[in-house]
Amino acid sequence: MVATSAGRKRRFGRLDIWIWGFLTPTVVLYGLYTVYPIIASYWYSFVEWNGFEADKEFVGLRNYQEVLADPLFWNTFKITVLFMVATVPIKVISTLFVAILLNSPKMPFRGLFRTAFFLPVVTTTAIVGVVMQFVFDPASGPVNLLLMKLGLVDEGINFLGSSSTALWTVVGVYVWKWFGITLIYWLAALQTIPDELYEAARIDGASPWGLMRWITMPLLKPFTIIITLLTLESTLKIFDLMLTMTNGGPYYSTEVVEIYIYRWAFAATVPQLGFASAAAVIFGLFVCFVGLFQLLGIRAARKAWSVT
Amino acid sequence: MTVVSETSLSAGSRRSARRNRWRPAAILRRLPWWIAAAVLAGGAFLWVYPFLWMVSASLKDPLEIFASGLQLIPDSLIWENYQRAWTDARFGQYLANTVIVTVATVVLVVVRCAMAGYVLGRYGFRGKKIVMGVLVATLFVPTGYTIIPVVDISNKLGLLNSLTGMIIALAGGPHVAGILLYAGYFRGLPKELEEAAVMDGAGFLSVFFRVMLPLANPVTATVTLLTFMATWNAFFLPLVFTFSRPDLRTLSVGMLAFVGEDSIDWSGMAAAAVISLLPIVALFIFLQRYFVEGIAGAVKS
């Protein structure tokens, strides 16, 4: 570095040594465990590799051909997208209503409510997933006991054991678990609206509906995009909840991409690490695509914000 | 929709509203609020119910759970369930592992994020754009994508079946938000601060440790809390790091293993869940404000 830049105006001086010294812990740790793996996945996806101790054998695009020909892989994408489409609107809209209520100083016990709705967010997802197996147990789980007591069903519903209900049960638990995060996002957004605006509008004789329609909604618009995108992105991370609640079953009906990768790389008797890496690379590209979409959305939101 | 209009009551009318609180008209006006509060109370109960059920089941006799599952108050308190979870199911050991892993990871992450954020926020240097670009690009990398190479590299370094390896791998995760939070904060501090310190003869290190880092305490609190939460609740990485070493399991991994081995012991399972969740829930109750602020920051920035 010093030799190549010696002729230029700025040399690699003392200050640069400090700067790169300060970056070293991040460059080493994050480089080794985040950046390198992202790149290495590509190389691994071109090899046949049955276990971490085994030798790798270059097979070209065969892993990709096999992954793309596997109906179960497409199934995982279908489930991931279905999960997104089901969760995001419910979560974004219901949390907005609760946030509007909780944002008002006239609301009794609002601090208590906020704490209650936020509580599941801090808890360990994997532990909650295991506990939910019991809560939704067909014979003795409290949900079914209540349904039976109310006379709504004659015998317990096997929520997690039947492929027609398992995914929707996880959707419900997921919304319950992460409701508080989106709620806090909305509350933060609502707090950016100055009280004076409402007061001025009231003096001008605006109705409560008018305030909502002409002040709250327009000012929340840029936040709506950001909050929707953040919620969308977070639905990609459902490994912990899915693995502990359903393990991807029954009959792969809740197998999301990360569980598919896990199954081939770690849960199979003969691990298919190359094959799993190919699936991971495709998943990574998908996440990248969602992320890019997100960036564009936020940029659009910023523009809308500066106009209003 | 009356809801919003009420938020805008001026201080004066709010005071008079308090005085008139018990007049019939005032009660009528407040009625929608109490109806809304009742609805929210129902929701809030639903939100905490699974935890209440868990605590209740952890204190019941195993047979009582099956006989009267909806009853939240146990007939008599059975503390042996905790004994069983702590010793037989080894949740004491798992708790110790989780505490070690979490504390070490938080320290490593906070130190590396503060240092990186400091130089990225306050100095211009060659390669800065590349570093920032790589960081932002990996903001949302899911663990499932990187897990195979992470295990492979840990295996090669001889770190796979150890807590040390788990700590290093967790500390090496993205944690980009932490770096960006520090960078943003340090960028906003006035230049005169370090100029004054340099005049007094302070070097690069002492400017950072004596002047800058103490000023960034609010950011350190946020990053500590967010990293603590992420590490305490981590699952995928601890799971694959402890396949052949059950004694190194963390709480989340131990829980899955417990129900895999013994799915009939409901009260033991519930006690184990309470042991696992109590520390993080207690921390949340005491530091609630910081949790909420840390998360709200994502939208504001």
Image (cartoon, rainbow, N blue to C red):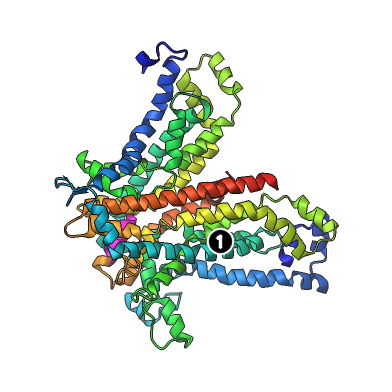
Mark 1 burial class by Cα count in 10 Å: few <14, some 14-19, many 20+: many
Report if residue A226 is visible in the image: yes
Q: Is residue A154 left or right of residue B263?
A: right
Report if residue B290 is visible in the image: no
Q: Residue at x 51, y 62 (%)?
A: A88
Question: Does residue B291 lie above or below B117 as drawn?
Answer: below
Pointer 1 indicates a residue of which chain?
A: A
Q: Quadrant of the C terminus of chain B?
A: top right
Residue B219: x %, y % from top left: 52, 39
| Displayed quadrant of residue B194 | top right
| Displayed quadrant of residue B173 | top left
Residue B166: x %, y % from top left: 29, 45
The residue singled out by tag 1 in the image is A92
Nearer the observer, B278 or B258: B258
- Taken as a whole, is the magenta stretch helix, strand or loop? helix
Amino acid on which disc 1 is placed: Val
Q: Considering the numbered disc 1 on the image, is that residue within a helix, a strand or a loop?
A: helix
Question: Does residue A252 lie above or below B190 as drawn?
Answer: below
Is residue B132 on the magenta stretch?
no
Nearer the observer, B293 or B124: B124
Q: Quadrant of the N terminus of chain B?
A: bottom right
Which stretch did the figure color magenta? B250-259
Q: Residue at x 44, y 58 (%)?
A: A235
Residue A264: x %, y % from top left: 24, 58
Is residue B256 on the magenta stretch?
yes
